[in-house]
Image (tube, rainbow, N blue to C red):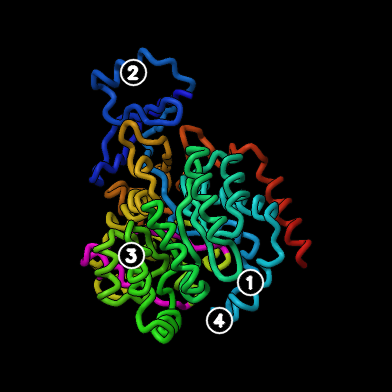
Amino acid sequence: MNIRIYNARLLIMNNSMEITCGEIMIHKNRIVYAGESDTPQAKQLQTKTCWDREIDAEGNLIMPGFKNAHTHSAMTFLRSYADDLPLAEWLNQQVFPMEAKLTAEDIYHLSKLAILEYLSGGITANFDMYLTPDTIARASIDCGFRTVMTGALNDFSQSLEEMERWYQTYNESDSLISFQLGFHAEYTTSLEKIEGVAALAEKYQAPVYMHNSETKSEVAGCIQRHGMTPTALFDKLGIYNYGGGGYHCVYMTEEDLDIFRKRNAWVVTNPGSNAKLASGIAPIQTMLDRGVNLAIGTDGPASNNCLDMFREMFLVTGLAKLREEDASAVNADQVLAMAISGGARAMCLPDCDSLLPGKYADLVMIDLHQPNMQPINNITKNLVYSGSKANVKMTMVNGKILYEAGAYNVGTPEEEIYAKVNEIMERFR
């Protein structure tokens, strides 16, 4: 489709947080123009293009969609199921036993539920680590959503052979789907398997992703087993030779941060999950000061329990200010960049980081005509400090409007999705 959105404020994010007034034009799944309405190029496109739809933004903000750079989408089935428990008890006595009951088809339906939540919150892509990539990919394609998957290899599920097949298959099949190498964590994955992942990374010159240094006990256990931190171990094994990233990264040494900077790896911080599970507060200001790449993820809906990037953004900056005892730490523009362009780059989605011509049309309309967005003193600070999912008026992925004014366009009625996931839970009770 050809879609023109005019009378808009635009946050293009071309290495700047400047907001301009104008319009954005989309041809099929790509942006062809974003800027002022009265330029010669704009006027030519306005008059010579046959528009399938022209939308008056009414002064609202158009910006690139949020990128949820770490999640486990299908864990929607455990939302509010086993809360307020110590981490080890929650994971070993509640999460793992319930996950063992899941079928691949269950994960398909549970992933679709998460996609609805992503869309209503302005998230246009997710970085999903879960058990059955084949059905996760099918759910995303059926909904028209963009998903980057990563391997969840550990000593209990998946294999190096499967991961290589997924890597070959899903980086060639559909523009909405891609796959990156990954494993669950050092404490769940044997050294032999991690070395196997490093060999695949070398073979494909590919980045690798995993949970890293989420808790004190995780880091202490790795030091006891290997005489070094998880990050140092991974670097020694060649895991980060081609970049990649770590999820959580709460307990990082100076050496760890130097490795991340040197390897151009990404820290994906998950403040909501880390707070709820009492894991700790990541040293975000220190990471920024040392030039470490940063992105933001929600983690899964079992540990968060909300797939909400507005809440995560506020927690990133709020907890950083508290940790540093400095209200100037980690400013709003830095956090917004982490949630949008940082996430896109961490997820190897360079065509989704801005509204520049040629980029994918993955964008969001933010309703500024609401009390929490007024007065318009500073829109980017409003987004981080007072914004909410209620401000998301429209979400477009790959040039297709999938959510607008409370209505979804994902091929399946939302009530049907809700009924299916509740049916799955009834089977488990």
In terms of secondary structure, where does tag 3 sit? helix
Could you say whether the residue bearing mark 4 is in a helix, strand or loop? loop
Residue sitting at the far bottom? 224
* Amino acid under disc 2: Leu
Quarter holding residue 302: bottom right
Marked residue nearer the N-terminal end (4 or 2) = 2
Query: In terms of sequence position, does the residue under pointer 3 or pointer 1 come before the other?
Result: 1
Question: How far is the residue under mark 3 from the one under mark 4?
Answer: 25 Å
Could you give the CA–CA distance between mark 4 and mark 2, rounded to whole angstroms?
58 Å
Against 300, residue 56 (above or below) is above
Q: Image point 27% across, 41% down: which residue?
A: 19
- At 50% from the left and 67% from the top, the residue drawn is 184
In this image, 98 relative to 400: left or right? right
Label annotation for residue 45 = 2
Distance from disc 2 to disc 3, alpha carbons, whole Å, reads 41 Å
What amino acid type should be assigned to the residue bearing mark 1?
Phe
Question: Front-most of 295 and 202?
Answer: 202
User: Which image quadrant: the C terminus?
Assistant: bottom right
Task: Please give the range of residues in magenta.
Answer: 278-301
Callout 2–callout 3 Cβ contact below 8 Å? no
Q: Which mark is residue 411?
A: none
Pointer 1 or 2: first along the chain: 2
Q: Observer-nearest residue: 314 or 144?
A: 144
Would you say the residues marked 4 and 2 are in contact, meaning their CB atoms lie under 8 Å apart?
Answer: no
* Residue, disc 1: 96
**Residue at the (37%, 38%) spot, across then down:** 62
Neighbourhood count class around disc 2 (C-alpha, 10 Å): few under 14, some 14–19, many 20 upward: some
The circle drawn on residue 317 is 3
Amino acid at circle 4 = Pro
Alpha-carbon distance for marks 3 and 1?
32 Å
Using the numbered discs, state the Cα–Cα distance from disc 1 to disc 4 in whole angstroms. Answer: 14 Å
